[in-house]
Image (cartoon, helix red, strand yellow):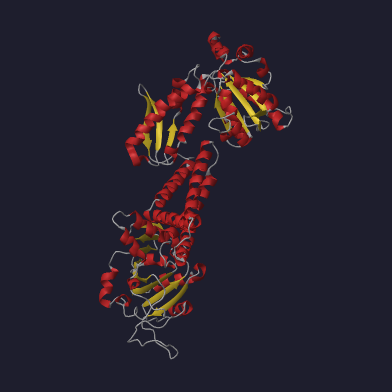
């Protein structure tokens, strides 16, 4: 802000570099930025690093006030504790960078002698004999020499015009001629005017609005023009430049806003902190609900940060921690065999079991960990883009994809320790109406997409002569039927059965255990009565042995129990008018089109498990019971 002459001088040299017309065998450019403090010398160095090398992190900064002793040169090229030199190591790792040497006049003479070689031949040999090259580096030195000449100037206009001759005399007094001759350009910076200080203040306020605490909570900071002018006037200092203005902004803007937000707590989330001026009161702070137009990116970043916090909270679940500890234990056990000096005495079967367990758990945990890392990285990049004034919309879209990827990985992680995760047996019953067509029919249509196979045993199914199956008196559920036959039966106009055993096999079929309970389907209009379906999880397996069939859990609901059960709290309640799905007696409500129920099943199952994990009143035994059925304690025969 306000340094047009200085920027023009830098641009002229950079143009030579871009055209590849700079002298050979030297750094890309060597500048000496000179002028009072707080006028933008370091800021311009950061801008150069971003423009030429793609990131402000490409700025390598050394404060020369730390290198005033005789051993300073040794630290830069020889290092300490047998490490490489500080300067040579950084340039060797990042040769395409901007090297900033702050307050060069304070450096020891030995350090300046090193700079002669850097600026003259663009090379420096460290104490180990390794040569470090500076051919792709821009060297910038800063100094406050001569800044006191403003005290002798008369009027603001005189103070604004740097005296180049005066600066050159001051430089000649402090630096050796051979060093000055190696500098491409001495760039003079003048003090900031009141108007320029206001421009700096507007930019500083914009940076305050982009701070993490405001962005993550969706809070917008909005200043009226007079409030910004008051900050600029209060923070203007001809001697201290922008640094004085930043201190005023922290004291008079940031601190009062922080006190207001701390007092309001969570109620401030998503609001706008409006800063205005009042006579004899200075700045006035008030919180208004909602955000002004044009702040969609800020709101998007707030949503993005909220998702990252959700990811961190979920990744801290005890079930996730148990898997992590189990994977670490298996790794240590499996590495024991290779590291032990004597022969491993464990049985081969135990080693094989541990290898299989590691192969089952580790990839699932790693997918979730990697997806969480992606979420963190995207949030950081989005915040960086916002702070640098770039569009962050594409990062918000990236976050949605990474967030969904983590959710699916988390769902599998929460059930990966269940050994029968690819099998389940359910009892499905209609309590009233015909909800089989709403729940069971769409499920069957998704079987190929999910890789699931189904076997059905229909209540009261008539046995054919080809069926080797006990009579209805001995076993009320008939022989196994295929999914295709079940679809045909569901299309029959006068279907007589209302209950069926469902045996499912396929990837993560165990997730169907989250469907266990009462399903209520509200009518398309208010005058249509709801229908009810009841799902019972029977076993964490898809086989039924001879000892399982007489079990009481296989007995469908009696007529006397129908009315009582249909009035119970719903496990799932679908409202087609509002297009909402309510989970666990309305503990969580999801927007959902009915026809997308099974396409979005993973999200529904995860929300179900999250409700249970986040409910402090539910203990771990209740969570484990989600996947355990009454037949799991009954040994199943190999014959189904």
Compared across the picture, whether 64 is left or right of 532 comes to right
Q: Residue at x 50, y 16 (%)?
A: 239
Quadrant for the N terminus in the image: top right
Residue 246 horizontal side relative to residue 129, left or right: left
| Above or below 639: residue 317 | above
Residue 479 x/y as whole percent: 41, 83
Q: Residue furthest bottom?
A: 465
Q: Is residue 251 above or below residue 288?
A: above
From the top left corner, tell me how far across and down residue 79 is, in percent: 56, 30
Q: Residue at x 35, y 32 (%)?
A: 259
- Give whichever of 388, 351 is nearer the camera: 351
Q: Is residue 614 visible?
A: yes
Q: Looking at this view, is 353 or 44 the one in front? A: 353
Can you give x and y, in whole percent of width and height, for residue 229 in the image?
46, 24
Query: Observer-nearest residue: 15 or 67?
Result: 67
Name above or below for residue 164 compared with residue 462: above
Where, quadrant-wise, is the C terminus in this rendering? bottom left
Horizontal side, residue 569 vs residue 32: left or right: left
Displayed quadrant of residue 261: top left
């Amino acid at each position: 802000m306000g340094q047009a002459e200085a920027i023009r001088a830098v641009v002229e040299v950079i143009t030579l570099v871009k055209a590849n017309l700079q002298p050979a065998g030297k750094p890309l450019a060597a500048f000496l930025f000179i002028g009072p403090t707080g006028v933008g010398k370091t800021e311009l160095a950061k801008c150069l690093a971003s423009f030429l090398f793609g990131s402000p992190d490409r700025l390598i900064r050394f404060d020369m006030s730390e290198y005033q002793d005789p051993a300073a040169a040794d630290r830069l090229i020889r290092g300490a504790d047998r490490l490489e030199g500080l300067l040579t190591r950084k340039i060797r790792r990042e040769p395409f960078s901007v090297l900033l040497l702050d307050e060069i006049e304070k450096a020891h003479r030995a350090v300046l002698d090193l700079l002669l070689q850097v600026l003259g031949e663009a090379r420096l040999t460290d104490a180990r004999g390794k040569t470090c090259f500076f051919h792709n580096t821009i060297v910038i030195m800063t100094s406050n020499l001569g800044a006191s000449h403003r005290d002798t100037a008369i009027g603001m206009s005189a103070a604004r015009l740097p005296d180049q001759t005066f600066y050159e005399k001051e430089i000649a007094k402090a630096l050796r001629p051979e060093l000055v001759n190696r500098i491409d350009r001495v760039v003079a910076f003048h003090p900031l005017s009141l108007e320029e200080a206001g421009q700096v203040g507007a930019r500083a306020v914009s940076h305050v609005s982009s701070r993490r605490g405001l962005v993550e909570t969706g809070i917008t900071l909005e200043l009226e023009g007079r409030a910004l002018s008051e900050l600029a006037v209060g923070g203007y200092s001809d001697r201290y430049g922008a640094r004085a203005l930043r201190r005023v902004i922290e004291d008079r803007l940031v601190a009062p806003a922080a006190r207001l937000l701390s007092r309001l707590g969570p109620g401030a989330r998503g609001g706008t902190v409006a800063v205005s001026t009042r006579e004899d009161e200075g700045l006035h702070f008030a919180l208004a609900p909602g955000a002004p137009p044009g702040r969609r990116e800020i709101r998007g970043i707030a949503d993005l940060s909220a998702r990252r916090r959700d990811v961190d909270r979920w990744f801290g679940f005890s079930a996730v921690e148990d898997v992590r500890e189990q994977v670490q234990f298996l790794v240590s056990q499996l590495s024991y065999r290779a590291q032990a000096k004597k022969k491993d005495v464990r049985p081969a079967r135990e080693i094989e079991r541990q290898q299989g367990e590691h192969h089952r758990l580790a990839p699932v945990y790693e997918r979730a960990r990697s997806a969480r890392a992606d979420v963190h990285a995207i949030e950081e990049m989005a915040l960086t883009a916002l702070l640098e004034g770039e569009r962050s919309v594409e990062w918000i879209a990236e976050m949605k994809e990474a967030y969904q990827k983590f959710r699916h990985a988390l769902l599998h992680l929460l059930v990966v320790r269940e050994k029968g995760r690819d099998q389940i047996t359910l009892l499905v019953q209609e309590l009233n109406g015909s909800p089989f067509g709403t729940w069971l029919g769409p499920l069957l249509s998704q079987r190929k997409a999910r890789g699931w196979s189904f076997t059905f045993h229909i209540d009261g199914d008539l046995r054919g002569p080809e069926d080797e199956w006990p009579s209805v008196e001995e076993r009320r559920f008939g022989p196994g039927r295929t999914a295709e036959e079940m679809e045909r039966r569901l299309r029959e106009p006068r279907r007589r059965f209302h209950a069926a055993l469902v045996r499912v096999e396929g990837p993560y079929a165990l997730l169907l255990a989250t469907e266990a309970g009462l399903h209520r389907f509200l009518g398309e209009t208010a005058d249509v009565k709801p229908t009810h379906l009841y799902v019972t999880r029977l076993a964490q397996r898809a086989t039924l042995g001879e000892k399982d069939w007489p079990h009481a859990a296989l007995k469908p609901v009696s007529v006397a129990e129908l009315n009582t059960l249909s009035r119970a709290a719903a496990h799932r309640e679908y409202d087609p008018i509002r297009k909402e799905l309510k989970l666990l007696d309305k503990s969580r409500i999801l927007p959902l089109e009915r026809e997308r129920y099974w396409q979005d099943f993973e999200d529904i199952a995860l929300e179900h498990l999250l409700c249970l994990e986040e409910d402090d009143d539910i203990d771990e035994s209740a969570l484990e019971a989600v996947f355990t059925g009454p037949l799991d304690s009954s040994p199943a025969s190999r014959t189904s």
